[in-house]
Amino acid sequence: MRRSSFLLLFALACPWALADGPRAGNLELGPAWSRASTWDATAREVYLDIHDRGGDGDRLSGASSPLAWRVDLQTTVRIGEARRVMTLVSFGIPAGGTLALKPDGSHLTLVGLRQPVTPGQRIPLVLRFEKAGEVRVEATAQ
C-alpha cells in the first residue's frame, strides 16, 4: 500500500518523469503536430513543447525534414493590429523552463513542401540543439 501511494504521489508531482516523449540530455519533447495542407500548399507549421528538466538551458539552432526544402525557426509578433512573421537564428530554452512552439507564436515552418501533408501523416524532423545535439521526432498532421 505504501509503495503504490509513493508512486502515485511521484507521478502527480513529476508527470514529466513518466512521459514517453523523446529526450535528449536534459530536454524532453512533447508531442509534435501540424495541420494538414491543401494540395497546393508550399509551407506548413509544426508545433511542440520542449522542456528543460534541470539543465542549464539550451538553444534550438535548426531543424530539417525530408518533406521540405528547408525548415525555418519563426515567430509571430503583433505590431498594432498587424501580425508579422520573423525568421530567427535560434530559440532559447530556459533552464528548468519550457519553449512552447504554438500557433500565433514561435513555431517551425516547413518551407518548400515536396508533397501535400495529409491528416494522420507522420512528418519526420531532425531538431538540432546546441548542447543536446540532434534529436529525431515525428509530427502528426491533424
Image (cartoon, rainbow, N blue to C red):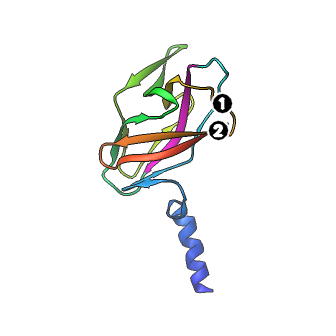
Q: Which residue is mark 2?
A: 121
| Prevailing secondary structure of the magenta residues | strand
Name the residue: 65% across, 26% down.
37
Describe residue 108's horizontal placement relative to residue 118 as left or right.
left
On-image quarter of the N terminus: bottom right
Q: Nearer the viewer, mark 1 or mark 2?
A: 2
Which quadrant: the C terminus?
Answer: top right
**Which quadrant would residue 115 be assigned to in this image?**
top right
Q: Which residues are magenta?
A: 42-51
Q: In the image, what residue occupies the spot 58% across and 85% down? A: 2
Give the distance between the C-alpha atoms of the residues marked 1 and 2, in whole angstroms. Answer: 8 Å
Query: Looking at this view, is 8 or 20 the one in front?
Result: 20
Tell me which residue sits at (69%, 35%) in the image.
119
> Residue 84 placed where, x, y %?
48, 16
Q: Give the amino acid at mark 2.
A: Gln
Residue in front for this viewpoint, 9 or 50? 50
Rendered location of residue 11, percent (x, y): 56, 68
**Dot 1: what SS?**
loop
Q: Is residue 78 above or below residue 97?
A: above
